[in-house]
Amino acid sequence: MILIIYAHPYPQHSHANKRMIELAGTLPNLEIRSLYQLYPDFNIDIAAEQAALSRADVVVWQHPMQWYSVPPLLKLWMDKVLAHGWAYGEGATALHGKSVLWAVTTGGGEQHFDIGDNPGFSVLGQPLQATALYCGLRWLEPFSMHCTFICDDDTLSTQAQAYQQRLANLLEVQHG
Ligand SMILES: Cc1cc2nc3c(=O)[nH]c(=O)nc-3n(C[C@H](O)[C@H](O)[C@H](O)COP(=O)(O)O)c2cc1C
């Protein structure tokens, strides 16, 4: 089972993620939890989130990039749900053997990530990758959709289809 943890602060205004979620939602054995719709008051139901994670083989963290990072509710979700004694720490094996896919959309293109002392897009995944590995999750090759500000509808749709195919392939692997 694939679990998409979807964090878009303004899902009704989305172009890129909306298409991705719509196509992903047509797949079997896939659950979508839209954090900003479930928790508009940021009051995350930790038990419900952990139960959903327990059901999943593959976890997807899908979100638009915000200031080179994740939207605040996804960060809070990690802080609360990936709890000591459950996700990490002595004897905590709840997430061991599961995989995680980082699926991110960005307004910027390649040059947008070409600044700072450690430039490059992949550097931005490091905190998420380290978090995943620390919890015993397997880190999959991320899925990214760039230049969303200037993409036309056809390009957005093509990339959303590529995302759907990626998820379908992961489901196929799970089912052998
Ligand atoms: C508060 C805020 C911060 C953002 N920061 C970045 C950023 O650091 N880098 C970037 O490439 N895009 C940034 N964006 C643009 C979003 O990533 C982009 O609009 C989104 O990926 C498009 O997906 P959507 O159509 O699903 O909303 C930011 C947008 C907002 C609202």
Image (tube, rainbow, N blue to C red):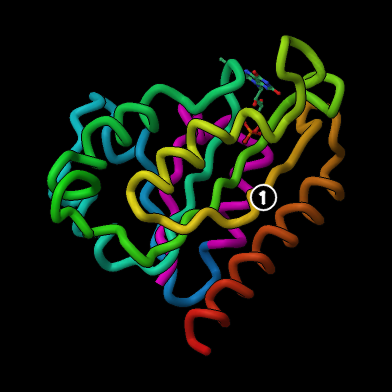
Tell which of 15 and 85 is nearer to you: 85
Extreme front residue here? 90
Q: Is residue 8 magenta?
A: yes
Q: Which residue is mark 1?
A: 143
User: In what element is the residue under mark 1?
Assistant: strand
Mark 1 residue's CB less than 8 Å from ligand 1 = no
Tell which of 18 and 119 is nearer to you: 119
* Residue appearing at x 66%, y 36% in the figure: 105
Q: Is residue 84 above or below residue 47?
A: above
Q: Is residue 55 above or below residue 85?
A: below
**Which amino acid, by three-letter code, is at mark 1?**
Phe
Range covered by the magenta-colored residues:
1-24
Task: Locate residue 167, reporting x and y percent.
Answer: 59, 66
Left or right, 5 with respect to 84, comes to right
* Ligand 1 shown in quarter: top right
* Residue appearing at x 69%, y 68% in the figure: 165
Q: Is residue 112 above or below residue 64?
A: above
Residue 85, located in which quarter of the rendered image?
top left
Task: Locate residue 77, reporting x and y percent.
Answer: 30, 35
Callout count: 1
* Residue appearing at x 52%, y 53% in the figure: 139
Q: Is residue 17 magenta?
A: yes
* Residue appearing at x 40%, y 22% in the figure: 72
**Quick one: label 1, few (<14), some, or many (20+) residues within 10 Å?**
some
Task: Locate residue 118, reporting x and y percent.
Answer: 71, 18
Image quarter (top left, top right, bottom left or bottom right) of the N terminus: bottom left
